Image (cartoon, coloured by chain):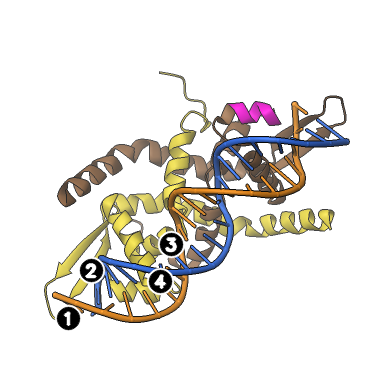
Chain colours: A yellow, B brown, C blue, D orange
Amino acid sequence: MKPRHLHLSEDCRAVSGILQRVGDKWTVLVIGKLGDGPMRFNELRSAVGGISQKMLTTTLRGLERDGFVTRTVFPTIPPRVDYELTDLGRELLEPVTALGEWARQNTGRVNAARARFDAAVE
Amino acid sequence: MKPRHLHLSEDCRAVSGILQRVGDKWTVLVIGKLGDGPMRFNELRSAVGGISQKMLTTTLRGLERDGFVTRTVFPTIPPRVDYELTDLGRELLEPVTALGEWARQNTGRVNAARARFDAAVE
DNA sequence: CAGCATCCTCCAGGATACTG
DNA sequence: CAGTATCCTGGAGGATGCTG
C-alpha cells in the first residue's frame, strides 16, 4: 500500500465520482430537505421548490438505488409514499454539510475573485 | 446520538451551487493534481489523464476566475504556463478531501446497495 | 397522490484542425 | 507548448398529458 499523504490525488477518481453523483442539480437539495425527517413526494416537491416531477422521481430513484434513501409505500387511497434518509444517507450528509459550510463562508471571496477576473477581461 | 443541527436546509442552495461548481467532470481531478504543487499545462493534462485539451482549458479558466488557481505565463519560446492553487484553492481542497475520504470508505456500501436494488428490479 | 411516457431543448464535453 | 476555433453528439433536465 502506498503511504497516505494528505492529498486526494490517489483517490481522486473516487472523489470525482461521488462529487458528480452528488453534484447534479437536485440531489443535495433533496437530501438536505430529507435531513429534517421523512417526507411525502409532493411535500418534498414543494419544499425543494422549482423541481419538476420527473426530476424529483429520477433523483429519488437514484438515491434509493445507492442506499441513501428508503421508499415506503402506504397502499391507501389516495396512495401515500414516504421518503426517508437511511443511516448511510445521514452519514453522507455530514461531509456534504461541511462542504456547504465552507461554501457559505467563502462565497464572498469567490464572488470577489470573479468580479476581479471579469473586470480584468473587460 | 446524532448532532441535531445539521440543518443544511437553510443554505442548501449555496451548497448545491458549490457542489455543481466542483461536481463537473474534471474540476476535482485538476485541483487534486494541483494539490501536489504547481504544474504546466501539458504536465497537468497527462497527469489527469483522459481529459481533452479543450476541457482542461475550460476547467482551468473557470478555476482561475473563481480564484482557486493562478495562471503564470513565462514569455519564453516555446511558451511555458504554470498553474498553481491559491490559498482559497487549498482551503477548498480540505472539505473536498473530507468528502473524498468518505467516498473512499463507503463506496463498498453504495455498490452493495446498488447491487441489491438492481437485483430486486431484475 | 404519486407517479410513467413522450417530446423537446440546451449545453457539457469530445474530436479535429489550425496558430503564435 | 499552450492554446483558439468549429463542429458534433449524448444526455441532463424541462413541459405536458395520462393513469391507478
Residue span colored magenta: B40-46
Asked whether the residues under marks 4 and 3 belong to the same chain, the reply is yes
Q: Does the magenta stretch include residue B43?
A: yes
- Residue drawn at x 40%, y 18% is A1
Left or right: A26, with B49 as reference point: left
The answer to whether residue B96 of the structure is visible from this angle is yes
Find numbered disc 3 in the image and state the secondary structure of the residue it sits on.
Answer: loop
Q: Which of C13 and B107 is in front in this view?
A: C13
Q: Give the residue number, with chain letter if any, for mark 3.
A: A26
Mark 4–mark 2 distance (CA, rounded to whole Å): 18 Å
Find numbered disc 2 in the image and state the secondary structure of the residue it sits on.
Answer: strand
Which of label 4 and label 2 is nearer to you?
4
Give the letter of the chain under mark 3.
Answer: A
Q: Give the residue number, with chain letter if any, for mark 1.
A: A78
Mark 4–mark 1 distance (CA, rounded to whole Å): 21 Å
Asked whether the residues under marks 1 and 3 belong to the same chain, the reply is yes
Residue B75 placement (x, y as % from top left): 87, 30
Which of label 4 and label 3 is nearer to you?
4
